Image (cartoon, grey):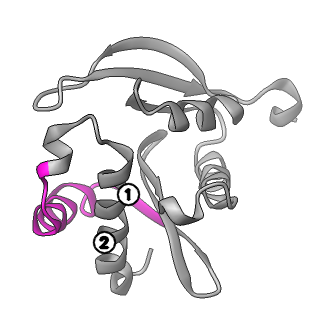
């Protein structure tokens, strides 16, 4: 991700969370300014950031912290376009031996996406406050054929 893409990424992230998390009042209450501040203070300084683009249009973004996919969002209008898969390919190239992530159990579309790409649910729990919603931890390790 280039620094000049920050505003577009934050706008995409904010719009996507509004659609993806209708069951999380805390996410619905966040303003675009809240998202900008959180991104600036907590995501950008500590994560490797990647974008998926096509024909100059931003499709999605991923925040990677070591082998942990902290955020992966694809704009709702372009989901199932291959952008999420492309970002996972990037994550696997950066961390070829394992990846981990959390998502909400109610985010069935995300769960299906990760499971389709070889992620296995390893733990069910509750996300930290203020959400305190049921979540699931996923891990990915390469299969023998992927490992070479």
Q: Is residue 99 above or below residue 7?
A: above
Query: How far across and how far down the image is residue 134, in percent?
Result: 31, 19
Q: Residue at x 19, y 49 (%)?
A: 28
Rendered image quadrant of residue 146: top right
Q: Nearer the viewer, residue 32 or 6?
A: 32
Q: Position of residue 4 (x, y in %)?
A: 35, 87
Q: Residues within 10 Å of mark 2 (few under 14, many from 20)?
A: some
The crowding category of the residue bearing disc 1, from other C-alpha atoms within 10 Å (few below 14, some 14 to 19, many at least 20), is some
Point out which mark residue 16 bears.
Answer: 1
Question: Residue 44 location in percent, x, y?
Answer: 27, 63
Instruction: Kindly identify the residue that appears in the image at 13 percent across and 55 percent down.
Output: 30
| Residue 59 tag number | none
Distance from label 1 to label 2 (Cα)? 8 Å
In the picture, the quarter occupied by the N terminus is: bottom left
Compared to residue 79, the image places residue 137 above or below, namely above
Q: Residue at x 73, y 30 (%)?
A: 142
Badge 2 element: helix
Give the secondary structure at mark 1. Answer: helix
Mark seen at residue 11? 2
Q: Is residue 87 left or right of residue 30?
A: right
Quarter of image, res 97: top right
Q: Which region is colored magenta?
A: 29-50
**Left or right of residue 27, residue 77 in this image:** right
Expressed as whole percent of the image width and height from the top left, the position of residue 32 reads 17, 67
């Amino acid at each position: 991700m280039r620094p000049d893409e920050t505003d577009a990424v934050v706008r995409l992230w904010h719009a996507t969370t509004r659609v993806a998390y209708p069951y999380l009042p805390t996410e619905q209450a966040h303003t675009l300014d809240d998202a900008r501040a959180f991104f600036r203070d907590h995501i950008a300084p500590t994560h490797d950031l990647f974008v998926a683009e096509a024909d100059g249009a931003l499709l999605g973004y991923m925040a990677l912290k070591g082998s942990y996919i902290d955020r992966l969002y694809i704009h709702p209008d372009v989901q199932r376009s291959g952008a999420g898969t492309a970002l996972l390919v990037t994550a696997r190239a950066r961390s070829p031996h394992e990846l981990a992530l959390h998502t909400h159990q109610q985010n069935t579309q995300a769960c299906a996406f990760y499971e389709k790409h070889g992620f296995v649910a390893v733990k069910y729990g509750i996300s930290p406050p203020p959400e305190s919603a049921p979540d699931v931890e996923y891990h990915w390790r390469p299969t023998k054929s992927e490992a070479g």
